[in-house]
Image: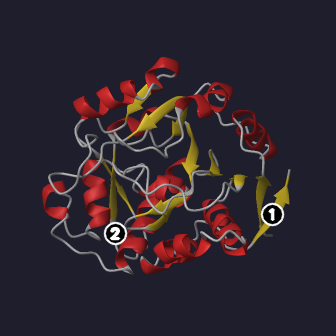
């Protein structure tokens, strides 16, 4: 059977909840709601007010992880203390309980059976405090991955700081100060992303759901201090229980668009071999690139 992906052109906080209900799932127990809380200076990330009805619907805890910037990049989210201050500045704690999953060491080290590049993934020790996960992704471009969606949220988004270093270096080091000296190829990096993502879906199994919002479609990620402004018009919201299908559907909506900014967006995706993350995740059995798009 083809995976089901639900779609609406209406981008509102209420529509996010409607798309979750379309999935016919009730996430059990303590729900981790993975978001991107936005780097300091970034103008494109989706604000807490946008996600508020959805987080409240599942009575979830907003979860984030520290970055692996080290001294190589800007940003303040690579240490728990400064990251926490920024989360407060961006208003997340005004509305939600928030948990930085890798705030306390040691990390959890999860195996990646059959991994293409990684044999293990490092995740924050708090991850096991949760029974289920709702992955809220802002679909847009990404400086290294070409694009960011559900798979990126599972991979880089859920990995600890050391885990991110391992992904970015394609398994060569988990030291964030060394990872930027390693140059993962345009094949190894997408495959490392897929490997890491697979360990998260394996852990939560059938207790995980995905919502992608195609809004503020910049070629840059919400992790960029200085991001390009959006190059395409907003497209809509998608929901699925299949992370491969939802990212493939988003990519297909971009490709079918007649928006003049499509070429610029796809140049970023293709120049980083971004589609290969979807290919690798499908090959690992995380989901299907074949789907049925059901408009709500």
Q: Position of residue 293 (x, y in %)?
A: 80, 63
Along the line of sight, the residue nearer the viewer: 188 or 251: 251
In this view, 222 is above or below 178: above
Q: Residue furthest top?
A: 94
**Residue at image x 78%, y 38%?**
18
| Quadrant the N terminus occupies | bottom right
Along the line of sight, the residue nearer the viewer: 254 or 98: 254
**Residue at image x 35%, y 77%?**
188
Alpha carbon separation for disc pair 2 and 1:
32 Å
**Residue at image x 59%, y 52%?**
205
Task: Using a 10 Å C-alpha cutoff, classify the residue at mark 1 as few (fewer than 14 neighbours), some (14 to 19) or many (20 or more).
Answer: some
Mark 2 vs 1, N-terminal side: 2
- On residue 118, the disc is 2
Q: Position of residue 220 (x, y in %)?
A: 44, 59
**Residue at image x 53%, y 20%?**
95
Q: Position of residue 154 (x, y in %)?
A: 48, 54
Q: Quadrant of residue 262?
A: bottom right
Q: Which residue is mark 1?
A: 293
- Asked if residue 186 shows in the view, the reply is yes
Task: Using a 10 Å C-alpha cutoff, classify the residue at mark 2 as few (fewer than 14 neighbours), some (14 to 19) or many (20 or more).
Answer: many
């Amino acid at each position: 059977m083809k995976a089901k992906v639900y779609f609406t052109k209406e981008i509102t906080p209420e529509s996010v909840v409607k798309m979750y209900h379309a999935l016919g799932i009730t996430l059990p127990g303590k729900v981790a709601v993975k978001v991107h809380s936005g780097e300091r200076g970034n103008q494109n990330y989706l604000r807490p007010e946008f996600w508020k009805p959805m987080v409240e619907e599942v009575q979830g805890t907003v979860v984030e992880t520290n970055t692996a910037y080290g001294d190589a990049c800007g940003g303040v989210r690579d240490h728990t203390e400064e990251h926490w201050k920024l989360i407060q500045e961006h208003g997340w704690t005004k509305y939600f309980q928030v948990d930085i999953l890798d705030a306390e060491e040691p990390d959890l080290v999860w195996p990646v059976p059959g991994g293409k590049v990684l044999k293990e993934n490092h995740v924050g020790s708090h991850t096991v405090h949760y029974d289920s996960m709702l992955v809220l992704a802002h679909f847009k471009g990404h400086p290294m991955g070409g694009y960011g969606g559900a798979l990126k949220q599972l991979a880089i988004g859920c990995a600890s700081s050391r885990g991110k270093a391992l992904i970015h270096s394609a398994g060569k080091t988990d030291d964030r100060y060394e990872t930027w000296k390693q140059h993962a190829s345009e094949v190894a990096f997408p495959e490392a992303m897929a490997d890491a993502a697979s360990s998260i879906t394996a852990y939560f199994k059938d207790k995980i759901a995905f919502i992608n919002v195609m809004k503020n479609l910049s070629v840059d990620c919400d992790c960029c201090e200085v991001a390009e402004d959006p190059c395409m018009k907003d497209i809509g919201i998608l929901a699925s229980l299949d992370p491969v299908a939802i990212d493939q559907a988003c990519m297909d909506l971009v490709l079918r668009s007649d928006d003049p900014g499509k070429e610029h967006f796809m140049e970023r995706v293709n120049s980083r071999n971004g589609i290969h993350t979807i290919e690798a995740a499908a090959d690992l059995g995380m989901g299907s690139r074949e789907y049925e798009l059901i408009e709500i």
